[in-house]
Image: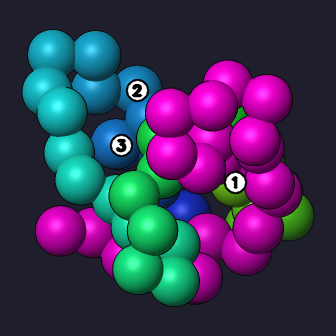
Amino acid sequence: MDVKRALEIYTDKNSTIEVKLEGQPVWIENVDEEHGMATVQVGSRPTNTHTVKVERLQEG
C-alpha cells in the first residue's frame, strides 16, 4: 500500500475497509505522510499497536 491510500483509508470514517499486516487484520490509527509510516492496532486489543512502513500494509 502507498501513503496516499493509507491516508484515504484512515480519513474515511464512513466505510470499513479491511487492512492487513502480515495476514493479521489491523486498524489504521495514524499515518505519518512525511516518513511513510502508519500506526496500526493489531486485532481487537487497543494496547496492541505497532508503527510500520505503509508498504507492509495490504488492503482487502
| Magenta highlight range | 39-60
CA gap, disc 1 and disc 2: 13 Å
Q: Is residue 31 magenta?
A: no
Q: Position of residue 24 (x, y in %)?
A: 45, 68
Q: Position of residue 10 (x, y in %)?
A: 44, 35
- The residue nearer to you, when weighing 32 against 18, is 18
Tell me the quarter of the picture where residue 58 sits: bottom left
User: Is the residue marked by circle 2 packed among few (<14), some (14-19), or many (20+) residues within 10 Å?
Assistant: some
Q: Which mark is residue 11?
A: 2
- Give the left or right position of residue 58, taking residue 34 as reference: left
- The residue nearer to you, when weighing 51 against 48, is 48
Q: Is residue 49 magenta?
A: yes
- Give the left or right position of residue 46, taking residue 57 as reference: right
What is the quadrant of the C terminus in the image?
Answer: bottom left
- Say which residue label 3 marks: 8
Helix, strand, or loop for circle 1?
A: strand
Helix, strand, or loop for circle 3?
A: helix
- The residue nearer to you, when weighing 52 against 3, is 52
Is residue 31 in view from this perspective? no
In the rendered view, would you say 60 is above or below 18?
below
Between disc 1 and disc 2, the foreground one is 1
